[in-house]
């Protein structure tokens, strides 16, 4: 078996984070559990200069879209501290000991202009795919309601790609709502899931090659065929047009992070 690649963290770049409960056990049982986790997430991300571009707290796992600043170790510190606090609350209430989480959270670098909106949609539609709710806005513990102005947990930071979808809040919300409600290709789901599970970047082959050349290290596992290309969307294109194409270079800050 090939050795596991060290976790890749790139400054100023979104990362899709997934953390599951130990043996897929529940990590949230009461509304207070979700509220406390979001409160801790807000506190630690503000303290450490990490932006939250999407989130969804499911019963036994969490999805986050996090962007670190220059301090790439900040993501690991956010995950460690929020996870530690959640474990402490759960153990105190249930009068037990031990870990609440799997030993290591999963992280995937997201190529901003190509996949950020698709990954945000994937994260915020988790409860719909799980048939917990009929519509994304019906689920209280994801960033979709904050994005749509329905409620505000004080956690979400709107990414420039999202902000470029319209000239006003109402235009952006209408464009994003249409994007979320449009059909999602099976290839898109598979690509995002594979990246999250493997730790490979959610990115084009060209981006990964550029990243490896800049960092002089392997950034993705081998042995899998070329992923299906995700189809473009008019809403996505508007966001992409507002940014120059991201190309990795030798000056980018990275971290080989094996924490958690």
Image (cartoon, rainbow, N blue to C red):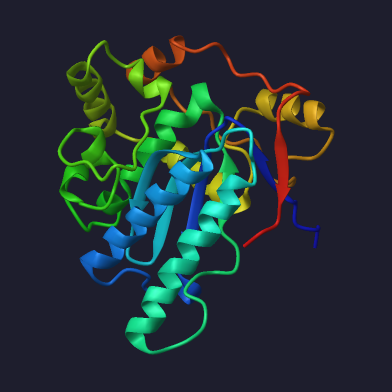
Residue at 22% over, 26% down = 178
Q: Residue at x 56, y 37 (%)?
A: 68
Decide which of 77, 122 is in the foreground and name it. 77
Q: Is residue 8 left or right of residue 179?
A: right
Q: Position of residue 103 (x, y in %)?
A: 59, 69
Tell me what residue is drawn at x 27 percent, y 53 percent: 127
Q: Image point 63% across, 33% down: which residue?
A: 70
* Position in image of residue 225 (x %, y %): 67, 40
Identity of the residue furthest to the right in this view? 216
7 in relation to 96, above or below: above
- Name the quadrant of the C terminus: bottom right
Q: Is residue 220 above or below residue 116?
A: below
Q: Nearer the viewer, residue 254 or 74?
A: 74
Q: Is residue 83 above or below residue 92?
A: above
Write down the quadrant of residue 215 in the picture: top right
Q: Can residue 25 be seen in this snapshot?
A: no
Q: Quadrant of residue 61?
A: bottom left
Residue 251 pos. (x, y %):
75, 23
């Amino acid at each position: 078996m090939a050795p596991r690649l060290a976790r890749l963290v790139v400054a100023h770049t979104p990362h899709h984070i997934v953390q599951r409960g130990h043996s897929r056990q529940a990590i949230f049982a009461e509304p207070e559990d979700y509220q406390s986790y979001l409160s801790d997430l807000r506190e630690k991300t503000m303290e450490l200069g990490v932006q939250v571009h999407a989130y969804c707290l499911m019963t036994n796992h969490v999805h986050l879209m996090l962007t670190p600043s220059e301090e790439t170790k900040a993501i690991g510190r956010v995950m460690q501290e929020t996870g530690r606090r959640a474990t402490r609350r759960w153990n105190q209430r249930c009068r037990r000991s031990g870990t609440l989480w799997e030993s290591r959270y999963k992280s995937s670098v997201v190529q901003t202009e190509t996949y950020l909106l698709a990954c945000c949609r994937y994260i915020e539609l988790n409860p719909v795919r799980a048939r917990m709710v009929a519509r994304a806005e019906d689920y209280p513990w994801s960033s979709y309601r904050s994005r749509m102005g329905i409620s505000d947990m004080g956690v979400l930071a709107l990414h420039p790609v999202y902000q470029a979808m319209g000239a006003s809040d109402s235009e952006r919300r209408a464009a994003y709502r249409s994007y979320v409600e449009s059909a999602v290709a099976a290839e898109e789901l598979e690509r995002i899931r594979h990246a999250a599970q493997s730790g490979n970047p959610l990115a084009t082959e060209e981006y990964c090659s550029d990243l490896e050349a800049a960092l002089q290290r392997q950034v993705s596992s081998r042995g899998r065929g070329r992923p299906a290309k995700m189809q473009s969307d008019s809403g996505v294109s508007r966001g992409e047009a507002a940014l120059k194409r991201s190309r990795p270079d030798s000056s980018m800050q990275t971290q080989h992070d094996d924490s958690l």
